[in-house]
Image (cartoon, grey):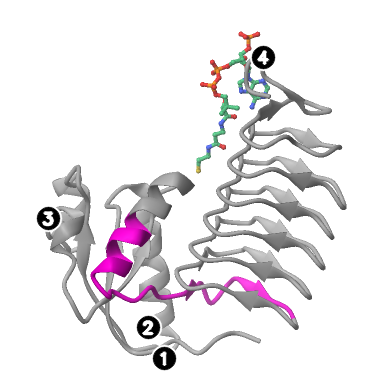
Amino acid sequence: MRPSIDPGPIVIVGAGGFGRECLDIVEALNDHGAALEFVGFVDDGGGDDELLQRRHTVCLGPTTSAPHGARFVIAIGDGAVRDRIARQFADRDLQAAVLIHPQATLGSDCRIGAGTILNAGARVTTNITLGRHVQLHANSTVGHDATLADFVSVFPGATISGSVTLGEGVTVGTGANVLPGVRVGRYAFVGAGAVVTGDVEPGATVVGVPATALPGTA
Ligand SMILES: CC(C)(COP(=O)(O)OP(=O)(O)OC[C@H]1O[C@@H](n2cnc3c(N)ncnc32)[C@H](O)[C@@H]1OP(=O)(O)O)[C@@H](O)C(=O)NCCC(=O)NCCS
């Protein structure tokens, strides 16, 4: 069941490529009847002025300039950075929004935490838990009974099979596959194109088919 989209102002944290993709999601939702008012990006590094001008928008300033009264999403791929920013925004009583592209699909009996983003083509089936500030990038899939903890990032085209558990802050690279029932420890990184056949230690970086840990990471 797709959560309803509360109307009102929204700010995107992070003015890079994924930030502009999130603006696409806001615009697509409004095309489908939502009433989101995009107020701008905030980014401690500024933004690419020319690219933002082409979207008829601006970077309002650093993250501290996010206006009160606007909800926010964090369009930054690094889960640890999202965790830090989410804490700062919670201290300021700012509320996170959920963004689900109209061309993402969401099955039955799913739970979605605040700040989570599903881009176009993301597919989530049944009995799935997505924590806070999870990112499912374009064309990624999550199978039945999976649990993705807070600050998980699943990059484009990655496949999370049934009954997988991804710990807090895990990143799954583009086109990777995590096989059924695998548990990936917190802040582990699955390299692009990897096939993960067994459990992964917290903090490890695994690559290849079948995936093995890069030296010194586990
Ligand atoms: C896994 C990853 C994080 C490693 O990055 P890193 O720590 O900087 O590692 P390096 O680039 O120094 O590579 C270390 C070794 O792993 C190999 N390697 C790196 N990534 C690999 C991958 N995805 N698959 C197979 N081997 C890989 C390198 O060839 C290198 O091998 P060598 O020591 O024999 O030369 C990164 O390569 C990756 O896959 N990132 C995912 C990016 C992504 O999906 N982005 C999407 C954004 S939308």
Find residue 88 and report its image quarter. Answer: bottom left
The answer, for residue 150, to whether it is visible in the render is: yes
Residue 186: x, y in percent?
Answer: 63, 44
- Label whose residue precedes the other's in the sequence (3 or 2): 2
Front residue of 78/121: it is 78
The residue mark sitting in front, 1 or 4, is 4
Mark 2 to mark 4: distance in Å? 47 Å
- Residue bearing mark 3: 61
- Label whose residue precedes the other's in the sequence (2 or 4): 2
Relative height, residue 29 to residue 80 (above, below): below
Q: Are marks 1 and 2 in contact (CB under 8 Å)?
A: yes
- Residue bearing mark 4: 215
Q: How many marks?
A: 4
Residue pictured at 22% horizontal, 49% vertical:
51
**Residue 7 falls left or right of residue 197:** left
Secondary structure under the numbered disc 2 in the rendered image: helix
Residue 55: x, y in percent?
Answer: 23, 61
